[in-house]
Image: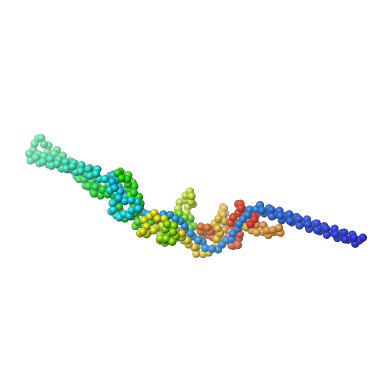
Amino acid sequence: MMEIGNVLRTRRKRNIRIAAALFFGLMLLTTFFSNTIQQLTYPKVRTEKAVYQQLSYVIKGEGTLTPREIKSVYDNSSWKVIQIEVEVGDKVKKGQRLLTLDTTEARNALLDEEALYKKNQLGMETLQTKYKGAHYNPSPEVNHLQVRTDMENLQLDMQIQERKLSRMREALSKQQYVIAPLDGIVTEVAADLGVPAAAGKPVIQIADLSQGLGWTLAVANEQVRGLKVGEEVELYMNGNQEDLIRAIVADIKDAEATANAAAGKQLAFRVSAAELKGGEAVGIHWERKSELAMATVPKKVVHSDAQGHFVYIVEERKGPLGNTFMIRKRYIKLGDMDERNQVILDGLIGEEKIVAESSEPVKDGDLVRM
């Protein structure tokens, strides 16, 4: 009987141990699955590590060559245009005719003025004869002093007429044609046949090719690092990156912000090529590497607040029911940057898992899943 009792007690203890093991196992399994299900509700993140590399400064863009200096040609004669001698795109030489003007009215006015001058000459001769007669044969009918005064007044009028006639003849000689003041390319013709030129507005625009052609391009601030005024670069023509011409960086200045673009830099290029005349399509693909390789991260992973710049890193914590991942804010010191990457001078050792993307916004202390 005692042996049977011992067997029963042993069996009962074993059953209790088995039940307890099953219970705790079930609790652990329930807790594990509960944690697993809970982790599925955490934001999912993708991480990157800092990369040691050189920065790459790249300038890309396309545009149109335009003359760097345009000379405006005016016609202030108020005479009608009867012939337009040039078209847009024509090469012209200094002194070449651009417009021919109708001088009919001016010539008629000159003839009228010459006739009036001739009439005054005859009047002067009459007064001179009367003055001489009054001097040698005084007569109460002729006022000697009045005749002298009339002669002096007429002489002044004739002097004014002489200057007027000189200006009219000069105008007819020089203003019958509008001529080119320099060698260049006609870029605009604003004259119309049969009507005078608009007062104060140029009738012809001429590109001064001696000043070369130019092109301006707006770029981000970080793209122009390493580029200097006076440096020679290559531009490609008409979309063909094998058809290259040389250009000089003429200017680098701050660009104004617009509705579609942030403020950056405006580059000005100068091109001197005899075969070009403006209007050609050009482009640039310029690239230069930084001297040193440094720790970099994508610019998009860098954030800022009132205390400075920071990145979010993921800390892994090991536990009996599995590992957990927590977001931590890490403040950093920034260095140089290019179009895509940012140099990190301090704050990282290089092995941190940096949050590059997340399924929803995260903050310091948040639990996430990888």
Choose top left, top right, bottom left or bottom right for residue 182.
bottom left
Name the colouring of the figure.
rainbow
Residue sitting farthest toward the top: 141
Residue 82, position in %: x, y?
28, 46
Residue 353, position in %: x, y?
61, 59
The residue nearer to you, when weighing 241 against 264, is: 241
Q: Residue at x 68, y 53 (%)?
A: 38
Determine whether 124 is above or below 89 in the image: above
Q: Residue at x 29, y 54 (%)?
A: 94
Q: Is residue 266 left or right of residue 116?
A: right
- Visible in this render: residue 196? no
Residue sitting farthest toward the bottom: 292
Residue 95, position in %: x, y?
28, 53
- Visible in this render: residue 168? yes
Choose top left, top right, bottom left or bottom right for residue 235.
bottom left
Report the quarter where the C terminus lies. bottom right
